[in-house]
Image: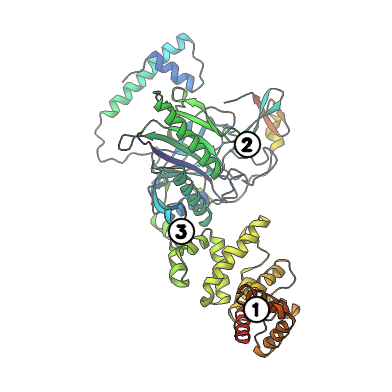
Amino acid sequence: MNQWEVVIGIETHAQLATVSKIFSGAATAFGAEPNTQACAVDLALPGVLPVLNRKAVDCAIRFGLAIGAKVAEKSVFARKNYFYPDLPKGYQISQFELPVVQGGAITVQVGQGEKAYEKTVRLTRAHLEEDAGKSLHEDFHGKTGIDLNRAGTPLLEIVTEPDMRSSDEAVAYAKALHALVRWIGICDGNMQEGSFRCDANVSVRRPGQPFGTRREIKNLNSFRFLKEAIDYEVQWQINELEEGRAIVQATVLFDPDTGETRMMRSKEDAHDYRYFPDPDLLPLLIDAEWITRTRATMPELPAAKQVRFEADYGLSAYDSRALTASLDMADFYEAVVAIAGKSAAKPCANWVMVDLAARLNRENLEIGESPVGAVQLGGLVLRIADNTVSNNIAKKIFEALWNGEGTTADEIIDKQGLKQITDSGAIEALIDEVLSANAAMVAEFRSGKEKAFNALVGQAMKATKGKANPQQVNELLKKKLG
Amino acid sequence: MSLTLEQVRRVAHLARIDLSESEAAATVIELNGILGLIEQMQAVDTAGVEPMAHAQDVSQRLREDVVSEANRRVDYQAVSPDVEAGLFLVPKVIE
């Protein structure tokens, strides 16, 4: 059977992290009472005029710089005309022919382990536009309720070339983009609140053939839905084609309950938006000086940081990637290493990626909300590195720090008497006691049962309340029995 | 280029303008008159002239990102025909 090739392009609406709207001075805070953040401009009352928010443009420039795109010296706002009650003006202010960000690319890692590979997704453009309001279709005596708080919220619409070839690649791209917009501080990335929403354009073709007809899946607000929707849509299109039916261009919605996509509108009733330059807004000019100024405020980007972590801290590519998943995580890690020392860079990585991450995950906390701070964790790793405590005891100290039983590892070590016993004489004395109390085990070991040795180590560790260095106990015990 | 009656009807529908039969016919003539003027303008050689997006050759002024508008829902909804629970009510729309 001939194989089908999947072709995916993604459009993402990222809500920009401004406190006021893109063209008005109304607030953008999430969750306010309906229509309490909708001013005369957002309501399109007669005589009002839009005035562009500088911060929204800053965000677009930051994004352009982060993806190596051209930041347009001159871009133009256009009216996208359609009628819907959540759009009071009868048009959305967007950008059409001359978007603010042009080109660029994002390189992502797809998959894990040996099968992992890198994929570069080219971006077509990113443009500034305003969001619409919300329609509430619940029961208002057969009417629809309109909340215009969201109307006029600044969005950056980020459009890719049709470069992705599987739902895994699409999800890897969406995750990388999500991490990037948060990293450069232009979007909070809150998908439940709709701050980051994806549309997927999906088609299939025989390899080497021209692109097939695409269908657009709208408004996917989780990575899981993105994958499920694409997988379902791809299978649906292949079935249609293999049964001899043509794909008709359409917009579809994904229903998470059924896991299916269903048609919202076909091309015949697709909107005719009649774009034209908005006469209320002049061209947006961005000079080289503004770009230079913005570049100076950009954080080190994930890819660069990853390379530096490998070089500076001797970490594996895997560790570096995990630690640069977010700027908060990377900053936390570096703060831990700053205390524990570069020679402990690898144990620091393990503590952040494994112990801390697992604990945060269990409590559903972000790293910024961690009860154990970077300085505290660094202090703890330092005490493992200098042999004050064993790794096992360190885990107990970590729990104690987490529960606020002390403010530093040193304080907890003192207070709870957890200092590792390294004095050979003291350990030997304990081992002697263990050996005389467990004569049967000793006999077993001597008769060739290796397992008995481990049991004796266990007994000895218990006798030291876990405070002895296990390796040291091992060696001393071997010597005694040898 | 000239418009047909059908095209004028479609544009009127997209703009939600209700045209009577006679208005539609008159509009075809008016719009085609305007398109005639545009055709004359298009005959001018503009090679090497950068297209303008606005009649004024100045750039967009920007505002700082500060919240300057207070909540005036009561005032705005006082002139709305139907409101409930802070929402504007409109005839039922389901896409």
Which secondary structure, mark 2? loop
Q: Is residue B81 visible?
A: yes
The chain ID associated with circle 1 is A
Q: Position of residue A198 (x, y in %)?
A: 51, 41
Q: Pick the residue in front: A320 or B62.
A: A320
- Asked where in the image residue B47 lies, by quadrant, the reply is top left
Q: Pick the residue in front: A151 or A11.
A: A11
Q: Are marks 2 and 1 on the same chain?
A: yes
Please determine whether, in this image, residue A75 is positioned above or below residue A392: above
Q: Position of residue A440 (x, y in %)?
A: 71, 78
Q: CA distance from mark 2 to mark 1?
A: 59 Å
> Which residue type does callout 3 highlight?
Thr
Disc 2 target residue: A148
Residue drawn 46% across and 48% down? A173
> Which residue type does callout 2 highlight?
Leu
Which secondary structure, mark 3? helix
> Which residue type does callout 1 highlight?
Val
Would you call the spot at circle 3 few (<14 residues within 10 Å), some (14-19), or many (20 or more)? some
The chain ID associated with circle 3 is A
Foreground mark, 3 or 1, reads 1
Q: Pick the residue in front: A372 or A228.
A: A228
Q: Which mark is residue A389?
A: 1
Q: Earlier in the sequence, mark 2 or mark 3?
A: 2
Disc 3 target residue: A294
Q: Earlier in the sequence, mark 3 or mark 1?
A: 3
Q: CA distance from mark 3 to mark 1?
A: 47 Å
Q: Earlier in the sequence, mark 2 or mark 1?
A: 2
Q: CA distance from mark 2 to mark 3?
A: 32 Å
Q: Which mark is residue B93?
A: none
Q: Are marks 3 and 1 in contact (CB under 8 Å)?
A: no
- Asked where in the image residue A114 lies, by quadrant, the reply is bottom left
Please determine whether, in this image, residue A308 is positioned above or below residue A2: below
